Every structure is written in C-alpha cells, then in structure tokens.
Amino acid sequence: MSHFLLEYRYIDMDARSRARAEHLDYLHRLQAEGTVVMAGPLGDTSGAVLVLDVADEAAVQDVIAGDPYTREHATADHRVRAWNVVVPAQG
C-alpha cells in the first residue's frame, strides 16, 4: 500500500452540515478497513485533509466518489498527492 494526501475545500457549508454525520460514518468505516489513517478539517475550516493508505491514485478517486460530501457537492478542488512516509506514526 501507499500513502496519499487528499486535500479539498468546502464550497457549500449548508450541504456540508446536511451530510456531515453520513460523511463521518463513511470515514470511520474506511478507517476500520485501514484506508483512512487520519482525517480532519483545516484549522481555518476552509477545507480538510485526509491521509489515506491505498494501492494507487485510482483508489483515492474511489474514496472521493464514495464520500457523501462529494454527492452533496459540499467540496471541490480535490488535490491528491502521493506521500513517501519516512517517519511513521508511533503507536
């Protein structure tokens, strides 16, 4: 598996509010499967960052497509970057 960073910005806060519970359920399910390493909104609440452990960028696109925020058009500008982890999390 490889690590990827997924960053996106919020474009519709009402849509985000409506889909938030379902979005969090989705992320927790992906975390239990080992796909989501960690995730959360940026400090200025303009968007969010997810760390994903997946095979390739196509798998990241699948995560984006399955996200309730995507369905509700709450986010945009999904930026995907491969990440080479040199110092892993302890734990």
Image: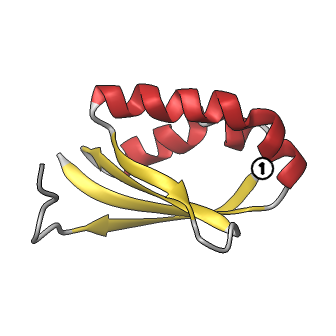
Q: Is residue 55 left or right of residue 90?
A: right
* Residue drawn at the location 16% of the way across and 67% of the way down: 85
Query: Is 32 placed left or right of 45 in the picture?
Result: left
Q: Residues within 10 Å of mark 1 (few under 14, many from 20)?
A: many
Q: Residue at x 48, y 46 (%)?
A: 61
Q: Say which amino acid is labelled 1.
A: Ala
* Horizontal and vertical percent position of residue 79: 52, 66
Q: Residue furthest right?
A: 14
**Quarter of image, res 55:** top left
Figure quadrant of residue 31: top left
Which of the pair 6/87 is nearer the observer? 87
Q: Position of residue 66 (x, y in %)?
A: 57, 32
Seen at 75% across and 35% down, the residue is 19
Work out which residue is located at the far front of the displayed protein and give it.
Answer: 91
Which colour assignment does the render follow?
secondary structure
Nearer to us in this view, 62 or 43:
43
Residue matched to label 1: 74
What residue lies at 34% left-to-right and 49% top-to-bottom?
52
Task: Give the vertical position of 61 relative to 62 (above or below).
Answer: below
Q: Against 65, is 50 above or below?
A: below
